[in-house]
Image: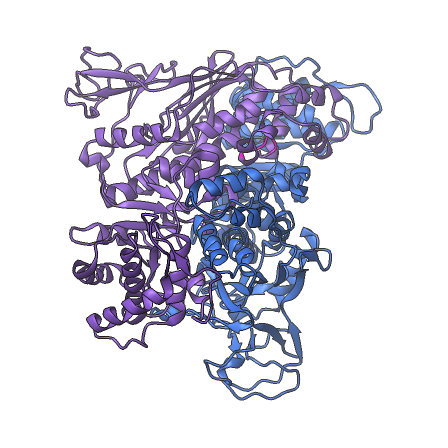
Chain colours: A purple, B blue
Amino acid sequence: MAAEQDPEGRAAARPLLTDLYQATMALGYWRAGRARDAAEFELFFRRCPFGGAFALAAGLRDCVRFLRAFRLRDADVQFLASVLPPDTDPAFFEHLRALDCSEVTVRALPEGSLAFPGVPLLQVSGPLLVVQLLETPLLCLVSYASLVATNAARLRLIAGPEKRLLEMGLRRAQGPDGGLTASTYSYLGGFDSSSNVLAGQLRGVPVAGTLAHSFVTSFSGSEVPPDPMLAPAAGEGPGVDLAAKAQVWLEHVCAHLGLGVQEPHPGERAAFVAYALAFPRAFQGLLDSYSVWRSGLPNFLAVALALGELGYRAVGVRLDSGDLLQQAQEIRKVFRAAASVPIAVSNNIDEEALARLAQEGSEVNVIGIGTSVVTCPQQPSLGGVYKLVAVGGQPRMKLTEDPEKQTLPGSKAAFRLLGSDGELAEEPAPQAGQELREPCTVRPAQVEPLLRLCLQQGQLCEPLPSLAESRALAQLSLSQLSPEHRRLRSPAQYQVGGSWQRALLPQQCPGTSP
Amino acid sequence: MAAEQDPEGRAAARPLLTDLYQATMALGYWRAGRARDAAEFELFFRRCPFGGAFALAAGLRDCVRFLRAFRLRDADVQFLASVLPPDTDPAFFEHLRALDCSEVTVRALPEGSLAFPGVPLLQVSGPLLVVQLLETPLLCLVSYASLVATNAARLRLIAGPEKRLLEMGLRRAQGPDGGLTASTYSYLGGFDSSSNVLAGQLRGVPVAGTLAHSFVTSFSGSEVPPDPMLAPAAGEGPGVDLAAKAQVWLEHVCAHLGLGVQEPHPGERAAFVAYALAFPRAFQGLLDSYSVWRSGLPNFLAVALALGELGYRAVGVRLDSGDLLQQAQEIRKVFRAAASVPIAVSNNIDEEALARLAQEGSEVNVIGIGTSVVTCPQQPSLGGVYKLVAVGGQPRMKLTEDPEKQTLPGSKAAFRLLGSDGELAEEPAPQAGQELREPCTVRPAQVEPLLRLCLQQGQLCEPLPSLAESRALAQLSLSQLSPEHRRLRSPAQYQVGGSWQRALLPQQCPGTSP
């Protein structure tokens, strides 16, 4: 099986990662002779997450990987047999054993596109039994990916384009793949890098990380490294005992800062020296294991200055507690007199805290965000749905008494209308140049079809863009959204117009125009 | 590698599912000659989730699986080499290649135990480099598992012991393994079953599921099943055309309910017949695809009565929209006149909605919960931490200026004190029969050590309990908690006493007694 060979495949969903009712319905369809009826489902959401007026489409690459590898193994079929009625016709299980997605066709919003309520992110067509079975895994793969990409995009909008945003939430993620998905799609949504090594290995997400408090507190100061010498950056001249050199600089630093030379913690300094010996070109000081002002900062400066004497430049400092903004500003004042190094901060940063750190003059350069990007605490699920819209070419709808849960029958086409300024036009219209009156009049300068043929009869129609390309599309898409829709609090809702507003239900409705 | 052979292993975390800084610190330790220093970390949380006063410990089985399979593959080491400095000593990578957990020892709270702030869920000791690398995956595996088990336990407390609780949140889960983890640990926390087939296959969680609206709406009523005949339940006598039989019953039902016989949707009835042909012993009607009262209910009754004539008994009905409580009560009135069948409900059920459905006289028997059990929207992460407490037998602590982030140094023992009534005693004490005065006096009838030796030098010390056994322990543990601590809103905080309250810091602190 392809997925078994592919290291990526091991991280992807498996066919039995589905709700049991998909399997019981499969048997129902099969018993009714309808397993191969042509069917079409649409995957969409009903409300934008986080109180915003936009979402980013994401998760398609995981869906494609899943669909191409989709095949029930013997053990899977045996497990299903164990939970279905014992007198089930064995021919049903033979049917399951032969299943794959070679007759499945998928149209999709490209990853990084803007997505709006009711507009399909995926249109999945193929034999009824198969496309029904796909419901749960596709929802699982698209909904969270789109949610976290949207969450990351919001954080990027708050931070502005200059701050470097690091996703570091793996430990708080909802399960291992939750972490992998979050790292992948927070990058797509606008983050610069992730702490998650697996996301780097499997997805090519840039990874970043330096040291934790445990590294610092593990040193008492009495440790003797086997090789305390560091060669100069230029590679010429004799090596220098870095710890001894830092000790010399410490006296200068303490005098400058008005501290006693005994105040900075010797274990912290030993940890900084150990880290600098391993990473002389990438030394970052984590300042708050003991006391930022009386220990972390002087120890960092001593080691950074010792490195500087050897021609190396420290890459910055990190703060992980306290008032991050105020400390960054005060540390910057010290650095102005000594060296210019980036300041990184972390510690429970949410949208509100980020806004404060992003304000002008904050002196913060790198922001690490964990829980609030990964778990999306404002709204931890997108609420995607996957609805049957046609069988055998005939439209289907759910006419429940709950109006919100009613669906629009029939396969939809979706277009995006652009004004002459390149911004998304507010109003709906299916044809360039054509005047429309309902619900308002617009003459779009440009009409873009939104859904692209992605898989045709199981075959990939064009190579998927790289993750970095999808990330660029996301930023481009967001830039085309007008400020009143892009606003994160109480935004104007973006109008998705339907051509069914002219062709009244229950006729088949041919198009939506977001 | 064991994990590769084991179908379970594919779903487990991998060594590179970690933060990059674990790898950079590994290099730092190695360069400092400290890779093999004996170190001990403790994994705990600082506050109980959801505003409650308890949590359930969970995730240990995933940790054990991860630790036993822990080994960096060549591709993993190569990836790390690609993100570490190019002049890193190749001997470091040889060290990584040889790493495993054969020198790691783990003590743990058994899964299903009550857990309280500050008390270790895991104590992990071994060579410093290895136990540092384990931080992120262990936090990822324990935190969410414990969070979702606690969430499920709260929902079970609200529902009471009689209602059947079905977890059905896979589609809303944060990534595929998020779904698998949620299904596994919501069962441990007190749910009865899950919709997630993979959780059944890999973890033995009982699975449940019947049919979705798409199954119902896929039928127009004109379909002709290849074999419309159903044999009687007893297996004797000729088969019967179930659709024709249901049509006959429909007239009686409509007359009884005061409906026109044309009102119930023929497609919905065809779907019910198709499902009943496949599952004559497990027919459940999903009533709200069109109209519960004018279509779903009469169609269900017609098919259920037709099945009844053949000796089969329908297993119930399901409602997925509208006022679930009111509908259940009204439907029960109809059933009292016709048949007695369980009523299942679902649709965005949170703690508040569940409390309403659990009230006396609700007439609801089965409750399906998705998003709110799986994504834990009240608090989507536990905030577990993994802190270094000793190196080389010497206690270590972080003395940051943020008091909440300070840690208690040294390895801890934890005990639980039980009163003579078997309930958890409120006050701290390390010895049965010994009087203690600070912070209050208690003479526990029984003292239980909490942490059990789980892995010793990489070897499993005793077989892990089955998931069902851990589930039983969870219910037993919860029953021992007194009502004021078990209360979900504004509970009394359970007192975790520390023997360090007698032996003042900074001396090594030998014990906590939750």
Q: Which quadrant is the C terminus of chain A positioned in?
A: top left
Residue A41 appears left or right of A282 = right
* Number of on-image labels: 0
- Residue at 23%, 36% (x, y): give it: A486
Depth check: A322 or A365 in front? A365
- Residue at 53%, 32% (x, y): give it: A8
Residue lying furthest right? B236
User: How far across and how far down the image is residue A179, in percent?
Assistant: 47, 44
Residue lying furthest front? A237
Depth check: A157 or B255 in front? A157
- Residue B291 belongs to magenta span: no
Q: Say if residue A241 shows up in the picture.
A: yes
Say above or below: B505 vs A324.
Answer: below
Q: Say if residue B163 shows up in the picture.
A: no
User: How far across and how far down the image is residue B18, in percent?
Assistant: 49, 48
Depth check: A67 or B508 in front? B508
Q: Which quadrant is the N terminus of chain A positioned in?
A: top right
Say above or below: A7 vs A268.
Answer: above
Specify the principal SS of the magenta part.
Answer: loop
- Residue at 49%, 65% (x, y): give it: B388
User: How far across and how far down the image is residue B381, in percent?
Assistant: 45, 53
Residue A233 appears left or right of B510 = left
Residue B78 appears left or right of A379 = right
* Residue stretch rendered in magenta on the structure: A12-16
